[in-house]
Image (tube, rainbow, N blue to C red):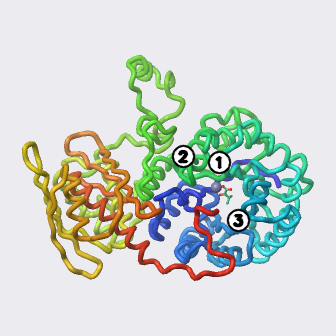
């Protein structure tokens, strides 16, 4: 199969969501999927339908709403079992282009300790299950899990069997992030040279960042024939995460003269190597960070707060004289605008809605009304409302989980020489308003203690961070927190010009996720057992 550009397969909603605490509700997944479609990804791996009814529903709704004729392919993950594959097939059915991605481990260590199967059995299952998936959809992807540590000769046999059974994409995962770039490149080259029917499939790569090598490994894989890259926004994912979409795409974009010849093009070809609209990268990164509660480190390549900042005088001087002295790409190429001041307190609903549309937000009528009320409240306190403020207001509005607990009032007294005291009123899921007060080591601690007295949901606060959206004393503050209950982590996020209010709302936001998870019906025990992300 010839492929003269790189296919971007986004797995933020599947492998990315496997990051501890990154779990998203169906509405949030839909919001991210819509943005991924605007970003221009070719395939969205929307979830693991057999894992839970919630996962099934999310994949199905994304298939319906985002998997349109001009939209991306919608993919569902399935272990190599009939039940998993049937669930994935049903979930992606509404999509114009649906894909089943089925996998089974091929490394000896996985066969012996996890699967307790022989190589012959794995080979047999591969053929049978790929054929079964092919009976449900045309587009079947197969992954030999832990390929990076598998015996190459066995890997070739499994891939040949998968392609013979109908797989049109074979994905090579470095599941544990173990390989180095030259080793990973050699694995891809070996597959191209030794799998007799490889020309009937696209070679894809999937990799984790345990040694910080995932992106480098993928770029080496591209040079050796890989044409699909499986990646996540901000590199989120299991353990140290997956290869970061923004890093891969910008590496291929900025260094296209270097990569062009590997795709059989003249070095100076201006034809983009991916379908990604790079100007949507920054916005997508912010959205995913806000909704998952996974903060982006300031020095993160491409999307970190410092990625385009020049601190040293020598660099600043150079950039002022000629940008390219210290900049290899333009901030605007990833959609970092000049943060224009666009609206103020006299701006009406129409101007507000128009600007949001220009920024690429599609809100429902109710979301728009609520966001407008929030904008008015912000504009009352803050004379100049920038694009970044708008983005923060809207992300905050659309990411509220179902409001089980609702913060009605928060009031604090604090300062030098006084004991920080907070009073809160919270409406419980039964509609009862409860008020209580507490003293803490600081105002946020007092607020959290007062909320705990009211909601009575045991948890441990493990992370708290405040970031300002723009500079200035009247800036909006964004608070992101993470809570732990037993083995599960829940994140919460809120934005407000008052950071105590933002802290209280972020806490309620996380508690609502925790409480909603507690209320979810447990999946019926079926054969085979329902996997949890940690067992994939
Ligand atoms: O890391 C991995 O091996 C996976 C597979 C399911 C592709 O996520
Ligand atoms: Zn993975």
Q: Residue furthest right?
A: 196
Q: Which residue is mark 1?
A: 274
Which comes sooner in the sequence, label 3 or label 2?
3
Q: CA distance from mark 1 to mark 3?
A: 21 Å
Q: Position of residue 414 (x, y in %)?
A: 11, 50
Q: Which residue is mark 2?
A: 278
Mark 1 touching mark 3, by CB under 8 A?
no
Circle 1 — which element? loop
- Quarter holding residue 260: top right
Which comes sooner in the sequence, label 1 or label 3?
3
- Quarter holding residue 491: bottom left
**Label 1, residues with CA under 10 Å away: few <14, some 14-19, many ≥20:** many
- The residue at 19%/49% (across/down) is 442
Q: Which quadrant of the figure contains the C terminus?
A: bottom right
Q: Which residue is mark 3?
A: 101
Residue 135 horizontal side relative to residue 283, left or right: right
């Amino acid at each position: 199969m010839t492929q003269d550009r790189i296919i971007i397969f986004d797995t933020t909603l599947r492998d990315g969501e496997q990051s501890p605490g990154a779990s998203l509700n169906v509405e949030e997944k839909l919001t991210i999927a819509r943005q991924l479609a605007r970003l221009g990804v070719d395939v969205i791996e929307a979830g693991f339908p057999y894992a839970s009814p919630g996962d099934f529903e999310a994949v199905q709704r994304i298939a319906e709403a985002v998997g349109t004729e001009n939209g991306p392919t919608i993919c569902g993950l399935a272990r190599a079992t009939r039940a998993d594959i049937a669930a994935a097939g049903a979930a992606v059915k509404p999509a114009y282009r649906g894909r089943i991605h089925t996998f089974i481990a091929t490394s000896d260590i996985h066969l012996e300790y996890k699967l307790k199967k022989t190589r012959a059995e794995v080979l047999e299952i591969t053929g049978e299950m790929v054929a079964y998936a092919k009976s449900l959809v045309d587009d079947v992807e197969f992954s030999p899990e832990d390929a990076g540590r598998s015996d190459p000769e066995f890997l070739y046999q499994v891939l040949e069997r998968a392609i013979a059974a109908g797989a049109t994409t074979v994905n090579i995962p470095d599941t544990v992030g173990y390989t180095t770039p030259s080793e990973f490149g050699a694995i891809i080259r070996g597959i191209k040279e030794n799998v007799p029917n490889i020309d009937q499939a696209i070679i894809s790569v999937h990799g984790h960042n345990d040694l910080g090598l995932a992106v480098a490994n993928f770029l080496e894989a591209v040079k050796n024939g890989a044409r699909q890259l499986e990646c996540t926004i901000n590199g989120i994912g299991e353990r140290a995460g997956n290869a970061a979409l923004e890093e891969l795409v910008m590496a291929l974009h900025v260094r296209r003269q270097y990569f062009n010849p590997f795709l059989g093009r003249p070095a100076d070809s201006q034809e983009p190597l991916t379908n990604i609209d790079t100007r949507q990268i920054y916005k997508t990164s912010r959205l995913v960070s806000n909704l998952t509660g996974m903060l982006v480190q300031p020095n993160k390549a491409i999307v970190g707060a410092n990625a385009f900042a020049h601190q040293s005088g020598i660099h600043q001087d150079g950039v002022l004289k000629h940008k390219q002295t210290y900049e290899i790409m333009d901030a605007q190429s990833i959609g970092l605008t000049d943060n224009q001041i666009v609206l103020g307190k006299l701006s009406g609903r129409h101007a507000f809605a128009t600007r949001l549309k220009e920024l690429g937000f599609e809100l429902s009528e109710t979301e728009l009304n609520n966001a407008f009320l929030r904008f008015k409240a912000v504009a009352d306190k803050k004379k100049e409302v920038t694009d970044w403020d708008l983005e923060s207001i809207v992300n905050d509005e659309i990411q509220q989980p179902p409001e089980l607990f609702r913060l009605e009032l928060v009031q604090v007294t604090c300062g030098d020489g006084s004991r920080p005291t907070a009073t809160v009123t919270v409406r419980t899921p039964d509609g009862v308003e409860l008020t209580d007060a507490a003293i803490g080591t600081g105002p946020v601690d007092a607020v959290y203690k007062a909320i705990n007295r009211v909601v009575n949901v045991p948890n441990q606060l493990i992370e708290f961070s405040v970031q300002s959206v723009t500079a200035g004393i009247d800036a909006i503050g964004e608070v992101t927190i993470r809570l732990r209950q037993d083995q599960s982590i829940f994140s919460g996020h809120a934005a407000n010009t008052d950071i105590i209010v933002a802290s209280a709302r972020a806490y309620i936001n996380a508690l609502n996720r925790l409480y909603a998870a507690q209320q979810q019906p447990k999946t019926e025990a079926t054969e085979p057992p329902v996997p949890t992300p940690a067992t994939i």
